[in-house]
Image: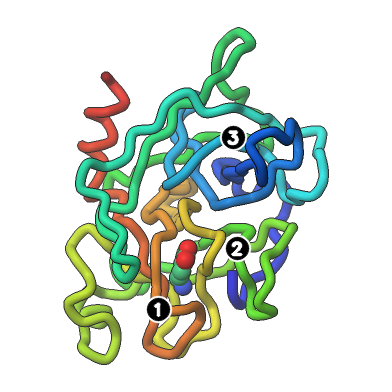
């Protein structure tokens, strides 16, 4: 996150840290790979997997509120395509493998599932993006950061000096054309959340962008509203 601040514990209870092992044989030493979003106590969304850590803010610490769950199954969108700029249909569903009854993640003050949008959010809406990705220092953050960003209209984001034809209708831009505040590498898979009448909705999934925080190169997100029927089809099967 560029231009962000340390989040408050419990402020992003649907935020997931997806972690991979550096080597095949090390039992511990998982490291943060990318973000994810808890959709239901049994499902999360993002792009790659191994284990998910829920409820945490400091990924270097074992926090008492952490829930660590392996991934049982991943469903990657059938039209996912990494070019790498742009990334098309950058969305996947991951089923949690929860071994203890009641076989799901436990909803707590620090772990909650996010809501899918049931209405359109207008451009200009103020939303929040969070993650452990790269900051303006060039390094990733061990602490979960968040930043306020605005939804940017397709018309503005499709301008030739912004992203032109790289954008498709399943993407949504957020940030500032002036640069400075943005998501970055390591945040991908994580939530872009907007609130309405006291409810938080996952409007976007961090996906791609030309660098981070650059002028006229805002962050590009998978537009969750365009994938809700794809998600419910695959969640029921
Ligand atoms: C990435 O590589 C990435 N500035 C994520 C977000 C953005 C750029 C790159 C947006 O995961």
Query: Horizontal placement of 51 versus 153: left or right?
Result: right
Q: Residue at x 19, y 65 (%)?
A: 168
Q: In the rendering, at what x and y percent does residue 19 appear?
A: 61, 43
Q: In the rendering, at what x and y percent does residue 199 appear?
A: 46, 45
Mark 1 crowdedness (10 Å alpha carbons): few <14, some 14-19, many ≥20: some
Between the C-alphas of marks 2 and 3, the distance is: 17 Å
Q: In the rendering, at what x and y percent does residue 75 appear?
A: 33, 33
Query: Horizontal placement of 24 versus 171: left or right?
Result: right
Q: Quadrant of residue 5?
A: bottom right
Q: Secondary structure at mark 2?
A: loop
Between the C-alphas of marks 3 and 1, the distance is: 28 Å
Between the C-alphas of marks 1 and 2, the distance is: 15 Å
Q: Is residue 120 visible?
A: no
Furthest residue to the top?
101
Relative depth, front residue between 99 and 150: 99
Q: In the rendering, at what x and y percent does residue 43 appear?
A: 45, 29
Where does label 2 land, which residue? 133
**Looking at the image, residue 7 lies above or below residue 138:** above
Whether label 2 lies within 8 Å of ligand 1 gets the answer: yes
* Nearer-N-terminus badge (2/3): 3
The circle on residue 51 is 3
Q: Residue at x 51, y 68 (%)?
A: 183
The circle on residue 210 is 1
Q: Secondary structure at mark 3?
A: strand
Query: Horizontal placement of 46 versus 104: left or right?
Result: left
Query: Horizontal placement of 177 versus 19: left or right?
Result: left
């Amino acid at each position: 996150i560029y231009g962000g601040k340390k989040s408050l514990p419990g402020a992003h209870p649907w935020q997931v840290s997806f972690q991979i092992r550096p080597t095949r044989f090390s039992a511990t030493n998982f490291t943060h790979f990318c973000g994810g979003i808890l959709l239901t106590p049994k499902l999360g969304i993002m792009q790659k997997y191994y284990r998910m850590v829920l409820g945490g803010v400091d990924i270097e610490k074992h926090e008492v509120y952490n829930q660590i769950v392996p991934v049982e199954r991943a469903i990657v969108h059938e039209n996912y395509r990494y070019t790498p700029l742009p990334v098309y249909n950058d969305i996947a569903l991951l089923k949690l493998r929860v071994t203890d009854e009641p076989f799901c993640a436990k909803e707590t003050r620090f772990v909650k599932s996010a809501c899918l949008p049931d209405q359109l959010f207008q451009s200009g809406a103020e939303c929040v993006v969070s993650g452990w990705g790269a900051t303006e220092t060039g390094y990733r953050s061990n602490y979960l950061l968040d930043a306020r960003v605005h939804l940017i209209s397709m018309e503005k984001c499709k301008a030739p000096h912004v992203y032109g034809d790289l954008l498709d209708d399943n993407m949504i831009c957020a940030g500032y054309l002036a640069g400075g505040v943005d998501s970055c590498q390591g945040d991908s898979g994580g939530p872009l959340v907007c609130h309405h009448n006291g409810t938080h909705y996952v409007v976007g999934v961090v996906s791609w962008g030309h660098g981070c925080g650059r002028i006229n190169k805002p962050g590009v997100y998978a537009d969750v509203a365009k994938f809700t029927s794809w998600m419910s089809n695959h969640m029921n099967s």
